[in-house]
Image (spheres, rainbow, N blue to C red):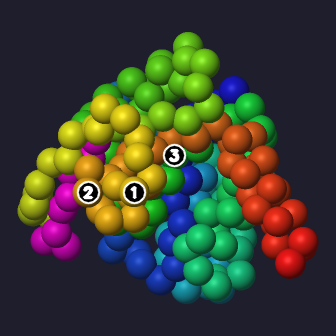
Amino acid sequence: MDLLVVTAVKNDLRGLLETRKSILDQSIDPHWVIVTPFDFSETHRACLEFLKLGQVNRLIQDDGHGVYSAMNKAIFESEGTDWIWFLNAGDEFAARNSYEIVKSTVAKIESRWLYGGHFLGSESRKILGEFKSPRAFKTSNQLFARKYISHQATIFQVGFLQESLANKNRRKELY
């Protein structure tokens, strides 16, 4: 079981560098996976350099057709017992020990997913607000962005996501 931090990125070197800084600043080394098109762009070349330097554990090539497609590819190319935390290009950890805390937590919980609070920041890196973790998850809050849970603050067991996506695809086949 490992806790994977997955970054989906396409043509966003600036955002990728911000996320990389946050990854490298963690109190323990995250298991970092990047999903990106292998198109020899500036971003792709940087990913290869991070891999060479040992800062990235794995690069996954995708088709570049969107962030959700990239995230799904990472899910299906990971082990079901692993946990996955999506921090896309430009996203950052809230604190220097965020990864360490979550890794310790997932090792001892029964649930197959967990969530926390998050900070909302601007492109100029100014904190616009802090959103505390809601006491209970409510789908309606997600739909109307009230006391919502950010995807960057949600960590899932990979097998849970694989099963959910497989069930979704089966339902599509029925119609």
Choose top left, top right, bottom left or bottom right for residue 158. Answer: top right
User: Alpha-carbon neighbours of circle 1 within 10 Å: few (<14), some, or many (≥20)?
Assistant: few
Q: Is residue 165 above or below residue 48?
A: above
Q: Are marks 2 and 3 in contact (CB under 8 Å)?
A: no
Which label sits in the foreground, 1 or 3?
1
> Is residue 147 inside the magenta stretch?
no
Circle 3 SS class: strand
Q: Residue at x 45, y 62 (%)?
A: 88
Q: Label 3 amino acid?
A: Trp
Q: Are marks 2 and 1 in contact (CB under 8 Å)?
A: yes
The CA distance from mark 2 to mark 1 is 8 Å
- For the question of whether residue 56 can be seen, the reply is no
Going from N to C along the chain, the mark reached first, 2 or 3, is: 3
Pinpoint residue 15: horizontal percent, then vertical percent: 35, 70
* Residue under pointer 3: 85
Q: Is residue 87 above or below residue 104?
A: below
Q: Is residue 6 left or right of residue 29?
A: right
**The N terminus is located in which quarter?**
top right
Circle 1 SS class: helix
Which label sits in the foreground, 2 or 1?
1
Tell me the tag on residue 17: none
Q: Label 1 amino acid?
A: Ser
The number of callouts visible is 3
* Residue under pointer 2: 146
* Residue under pointer 1: 140
Q: Residue at x 39, y 64 (%)?
A: 143
For the magenta stretch, what is the residue range?
117-124
Q: Are marks 1 and 3 in contact (CB under 8 Å)?
A: no
Q: Residue at x 10, y 61 (%)?
A: 128
**The C terminus is located in which quarter?**
bottom right
The CA distance from mark 1 to mark 3 is 23 Å
